[in-house]
Amino acid sequence: MEAAEIFRLVLVAVTLPFFVMLARRLRPEPGRNMLFAGVAVIYVSFVASVIEDVVAGDLFNMVQHASYGVAGVLGLIGVLSLRRALKGGGRS
Amino acid sequence: MIEFVALPAVVLGMVGFVGAFGLMLFTPARPAIGMTRLVKGLILTVLAMLVVSSALLFMSEADMEDMLGPASEPYVASLEDNIDTLFPLLVLGIAFAALSAQQYEDVVRSTRAHGRTHDLMMDIVDSAPAGILFLGPHGEITFANDTAREVLDLVESPATSAIITPAWTVAGLDGAAPGALATLVHDQPYDGWPVTVRWPSGVEVGLRASGRPLHDARNQLGGVVVSFERPSLGG
């Protein structure tokens, strides 16, 4: 377990409540929830990268890598939806 | 099984981040929904960081780190750590910037709507056949519509936009001694009070004034809205 990984987790724990508070006040827009879900999945990968050093290393290593795959797909879908809404000129 | 999932997942993530970056690069900014250039720039930065991060993860998973040479190892590890540390801060920054832009747009929209309502109300008040005045607590005229300006010969100072009261005097209520418009300042509503305005030339205009007091937040008299019908000349 590296100090940088612990520091990153602490940083996530400190910033997450503020992020949630700000995100809840934003009006819902197409794709925004997908992007937020992508962020959440990246945070899952951060947690998995710490846990893999303590217990079930292979499993959490897979979770860490799989999280990147899921986050990439969510990010792409989110940006696609956002782009479609922005080009359409309306809010759905 | 784990190795069969990890590498394709990272490749999938990398492709997704590269695609999202490319699409976002050519997505127009639209402040109306919080997508300002700053927000777009921050999202692009985060996506670029994720592309690099997933590429480094891929190289580590595929045992390709040696391609960069042994000297690069500490730099790669440091880059990975720095990217992952910056990520939560940048994500927070994006949410803050988007919310600020959204609130700014709300204020601008609300101000525009308020301005349109104000213009409409001014058009209605100015085109009213009755004279309408707003008197301050001491009887000074702070607003007069077109009819009131015409009847009372009121003019606006070009320099200060303040209304200049001409040399007429007001005969008090029920024929009392002449005074200022302060006689119309009252903290209770009134209807049809007779007021006579007398010009130095001797011309008199009889008005029947109605007033409604306005109070401020501390319930202090802030002024009176006075209205009167277009009068008939007398004297």
Image (cartoon, coloured by chain):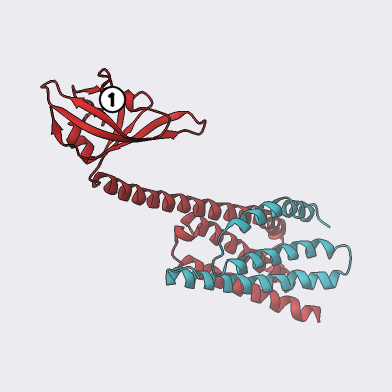
Say which quadrant the C terminus of chain B sits in.
Answer: top left
In the image, taking residue B198 as reference, residue A59 lies left or right, namely right
Q: Is residue A83 visible?
A: yes
Chain letter for mark 1: B
Q: Residue at x 32, y 24 (%)?
A: B183
Q: Residue furthest right?
A: A55
Nearer to the camera, A58 or B59: A58
Q: Is residue B146 above or below residue A66?
A: above
Q: Which chain is cyan?
A: A
Q: What residue sits right under mark 1 in the picture? A: B174
Residue B163 in the image: state x and y as whole percent. Answer: 25, 29
In the image, taking residue B209 as reference, residue A21 lies left or right, namely right
Say which quadrant the N terminus of chain B sits in.
Answer: bottom right
Residue B145 in the image: state x and y as whole percent. Answer: 25, 39
Residue A68 in the image: state x and y as whole percent. Answer: 69, 70
Q: Is residue A35 above or below residue A23?
A: below
Nearer to the camera, B219 or B54: B219
Q: Residue at x 20, y 39 (%)?
A: B230
Q: Is residue B63 visible?
A: no
When asked about the image quadrant of residue A39, the answer is bottom right
Q: Residue at x 54, y 69 (%)?
A: A30
Q: Count every numbered label the image shows and give the total.
A: 1
